[in-house]
Amino acid sequence: MELVLVGYQFPQIATAEYDSNWLNVRVRVHHARGDWTAQDPSLLTYEAAQLADWLEAVADGKEADAECSFLEPNLRFELRLAPSGQRVLRAFFELESRPKWATHDGVPEDDIFVDLPVDRSQLTAAAAALREQLQVYPQRAAR
C-alpha cells in the first residue's frame, strides 16, 4: 500500500478551518482480489500529522490507541497481532477509497482491507515520509 498527499482540495482557500486543510490523498493498493488506485480529499492536514504521530507511537512501543481513524471514513488503520505474533497494520478502505470492483451503498463495511506486516523501522519510515509530505502541505488555518 502506498499513501501520497497530492495537494490541497481547495488550494485557493487559505483561512477556513476545514476547507483550507483538506488534502487530496492517493492510495495505491495491492490486494488479492485486484489492485487499485484511488484519490479523494480524505485527510485534513492535522489528521495526516495525527497519523504520523500514531505510527511513531506504535513504532516506539508507547501506549497508543489500537486504531487511528479520521473525520472522513475513507481510511482507517488498526494495529493487530497476527497469529504468528508479528505486528500487523490493517488498513481499511471505504467510500471513495474503495476499489471499483467492491460495490457499496455508502455505509462503511470494514470488508476491504490489507494487512501489512510491520516492524519498528518500517513504521518509523512511514511516519517520516508522511511528515516530509506535510512540509509541502502544512496546516493553513487554525482549528
Image (spheres, rainbow, N blue to C red):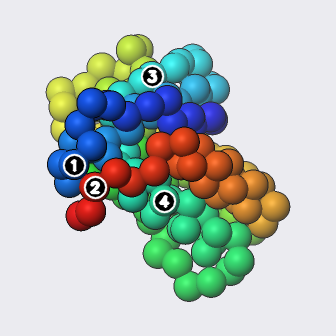
**Residue 46 image position (x, y, % from top left):** 39, 58
* Label 1 sits on residue: 15
- Residue extending farthest bottom: 63
Q: Secondary structure at mark 1?
A: loop
Q: Secondary structure at mark 3?
A: strand
Q: Secondary structure at mark 2?
A: loop
Q: Mark 2 is on which residue type?
A: Ala
Q: Residues within 10 Å of mark 3 (few under 14, many from 20)?
A: some
Marks 4,3: beta carbons within 8 A: no
Distance from the alpha carbon under mark 1 to that under mark 3: 28 Å
Marks 2,1: beta carbons within 8 A: yes
Q: Is residue 91 left or right of residue 31?
A: left
* Label 2 sits on residue: 141
Q: Residues within 10 Å of mark 4 (few under 14, many from 20)?
A: some
Q: Is residue 64 left or right of residue 143?
A: right
Q: Nearer the viewer, residue 1 or 116?
A: 1
The disc, 2 or 3, on the residue closer to the chain's N-terminal end is 3
Q: Residue at x 30, y 20 (%)?
A: 103
Q: Nearer the viewer, mark 2 or mark 3?
A: 2
Q: Mark 1 is on which residue type?
A: Thr
The disc, 1 or 4, on the residue closer to the chain's N-terminal end is 1
* Label 4 sits on residue: 49
- Residue extending farthest right: 121
Q: Residue at x 63, y 35 (%)?
A: 1
Q: Nearer the viewer, mark 1 or mark 3?
A: 1
Q: Nearer the viewer, mark 4 or mark 3?
A: 4
Quadrant location of the C terminus in the rendered image = bottom left
